[in-house]
Image (tube, grey):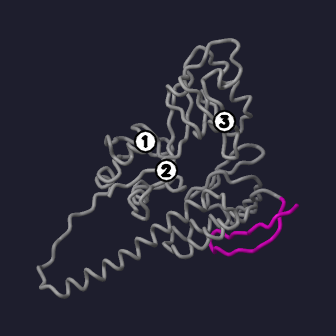
Amino acid sequence: MKRASIFLLVTGYRLLVTNCIFADTIYTNDGKELKGIIVEDYKDRVIFSTSEGEIVVMKEDVRELYYDNEEENLIKLAEQAKERSDYIRAFAYYDRAYKLNPKSKAAKDGLVFLQGYLFRQEQAKKEGEINRRSEMEQPSAGWKEEAPEVPRVTLRKEIGIALAGGEVFPKVEDLVVNSPAYEAGIRKGDSLVAVWGRLTGYLRQNEIIDILLEKSAMEIKCMIERPISVDVNRGSRAISADDLIGASFTMELDGLTVKGIREGGSSEAAGLKEQDKIISISGTATRYLALKKAIDLLKISRGRMVEIIIRREVIIWRKG
């Protein structure tokens, strides 16, 4: 059965409703037509999965994007509106996406973020009006020059982290013990992959810091990436992930996921948690691996430590 899809022009935000049974399509400026799935969307490029593997397509080379999913189109439009500071329109797009799919994580996160932002904006306006009236009723005390803002210092003070450049994503270079970031489970050396669903790979550091310091809600939803070394059971009869490392896996739409952790097992000792996404095992990416192939990678590491790279969603709660 065909499903309704939306045609999105990158530069004009114009929508044409049509029907299509294909996956996402990219039309390039030189007339090429690429079919596949957009798996990662950055500010200046997209990672496009095709039948021949993943490719990087720069947005400056893209004439049109054709998504096969109405919900995804609405999410993209909401993100574009949010980047333009058009928060009312962004809220409307997220709301429509949520009504299409109440289980949409991106839509729910967007609504939570904007509800907090709009509420605080309204409160700030009320406080500003009170302060303005108070100032009018008092004699002027002269101009007070404010100290220049230092975002990195503010980030360390309010959130508890300092960021440094990494190969793809920024790394946590320093961490304040008992800070909001520390209490959320972030540790020194972690990579910060996303904030409120926005991938950090091609964002400038000041843009990332601005997002982290934006007081639109009490919580900040982040995705971190971390390498974990797990001891693999040397027993020859170990055939499942639970036998091998004390954890069970499942293959979900967004990748290989930890389903359960055995108490007292090597995975628990290494810090693996339920719902962690397994990005790679022994340097082999798991995105397109079958579950059996992933377990086979553990089998060949019997009796040794295996490095597993995980991605984990964490929520930083602001103080005060």
Foreground residue, 97 or 60? 97
Q: Is residue 158 above or below residue 86?
A: above
Q: Residues within 10 Å of mark 1 (few under 14, many from 20)?
A: many
For label 1, the SS is: loop
Q: Is residue 255 above or below residue 64?
A: above
Badge 3 or badge 2: first in the primary sequence? 2
The residue wearing badge 2 is 222
Q: Which mark is residue 286?
A: 3
Horizontal relation, residue 207 to residue 16: left or right: left
For label 2, the SS is: strand
Which amino acid type is shown beneath numbered disc 2? Cys
Q: Nearer the viewer, mark 3 or mark 2?
A: 2
Task: Kindly indicate the quadrant of the structure image that contains residue 294.
Answer: top right
Badge 3 or badge 1: first in the primary sequence? 1
Extreme-front residue of the structure: 263
Residue 279 place in picture, x, y as percent: 60, 37
Identified at 68% across, 51% down, the residue is 48
Q: Are marks 1 and 2 in contact (CB under 8 Å)?
A: yes
Which amino acid type is shown beneath numbered disc 3? Thr
